[in-house]
Image (cartoon, rainbow, N blue to C red):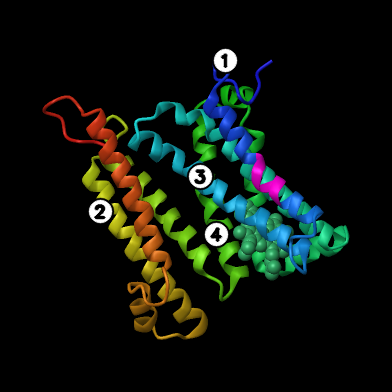
Amino acid sequence: MKYPWCDYRRRLSPLKLAVFTALFLPAAWTALAFATGNLGARPLTEAIHQQGLWTVRLILVALAITPLKAILQWQRLILVRRMVGVAAFTYVMLHFALYIADENFNLVTVASEVAKRIYLTIGFIALVGLAVLAATSTDKMVRRLGRRWQTLHRIVYVICALGLIHYSMQSKLEQWEPTIADGIFAWLMGYRLLAWKFAVRGRLALPWIAGLSVVATVLTGFGEALYFHLAFHVDLARVLAADFSLQTGVRPAVIVFAFSLIVLAAGLLRTRLAPPPKGRPRYA
Ligand code: HEM
């Protein structure tokens, strides 16, 4: 019997055990807050929101594992990717189940709402996509699908984009965290694009990561400005000015820049601790 906290050799993996335990915490926290009446005036709505947020966060974490594995030269990180992906699916099912409960278990209303409201339709398509990925994540399915498994699992990029659109659409004016999530997604996709073109033995030189940090930050700022301009006709220059100054609080572009710098610093530190053989460039 292979337990989720065992590695490929069926030995206990402390990394897998720690991640496995951590993945239960957000749901346990919501359940506890719900049971003790600490979820605000509309506990069910708040519980729906929290599980939705964790779905987005976990999809982003799953997408971050491949770049971090290369940048930190931490091969064992791959051991937890499937677990995080399956957890994202579990959280979206909780999110959906709570939504059904909020609609008094009336499945006809749920179906008609999903068909009528575009942000729910988009969310539902993403949920179906995650279900397909979860169902094809077993060792048996990976073996059976062979090379097609990797091709199929690339739909996670589309699923994440749909999840982020669903998130932004329902958040309306509250775009702070959705914009940060969009910026991090841009970084993660940019990394893959650069790695596909310029990686050597699966690793990308650090200057590429530095360039990517700048591009993702600028895209986040412009993306936020464009959203407020298109949705609320706010002057583009005004949002941009706010984006790149700290006077209006810490804007999403700044958080994305900080995230990029932390990853870059970790990459630098890692190459210093384990420098590449002489004559070879520094890789992340
Ligand atoms: C991968 C799929 C999905 C993801 C990533 C996702 C994520 C999210 C996120 C992040 C929020 C906002 C939380 C907040 O602002 O605090 C949200 C809200 C919501 N989602 Fe989803 N969701 C998904 C699928 C679905 C599905 C299938 C349904 C139902 C059919 C659904 C129904 C809702 C509802 C009702 C809200 C709250 C809207 C409001 O309060 O106005 N979501 N979702």
Earlier-in-chain disc, 3 versus 2? 3
> Of the numbered discs in the image, which one, if any, rests on residue 61?
3
Report whether 268 appears left or right of 185: left
Question: Given the image, on which type of amino acid does mark 2 rest?
Answer: Gly
Residue corresponding to mark 1: 11
Earlier-in-chain disc, 1 versus 2? 1
Mark 3 element type: helix
Q: Where's residue 248, x and y in %?
A: 41, 77
Q: Where's residue 175, x and y in %?
A: 52, 70
| Mark 1–mark 4 distance (CA, rounded to whole Å) | 37 Å
Quarter residue 38 falls in: bottom right
Q: Is residue 28 inside the magenta stretch?
A: yes
- Look at the magenta stretch and give its main secondary structure: helix
Q: Are marks 1 and 4 in contact (CB under 8 Å)?
A: no
- Residue 212 to residue 134: above or below: below
Residue corresponding to mark 2: 211
- Ligand 1 lies under 8 Å from the Cβ of mark 1: no
Mark 1 closeness class: few <14, some 14–19, many ≥20 residues within 10 Å: few
Mark 1 element type: loop
- Ligand 1 lies under 8 Å from the Cβ of mark 4: yes
Residue 95 seen: yes
Earlier-in-chain disc, 4 versus 2? 4
> Of the numbered discs in the image, which one, if any, rests on residue 117?
none
- Residue 54 to residue 196: above or below: below
> Of the numbered discs in the image, which one, if any, rests on residue 164?
4
Residue 124 seen: no
Span of residues in magenta? 24-29
| Mark 4–mark 2 distance (CA, rounded to whole Å) | 24 Å
Q: Nearer the viewer, residue 36 or 69?
A: 36
Quarter residue 273 falls in: top left
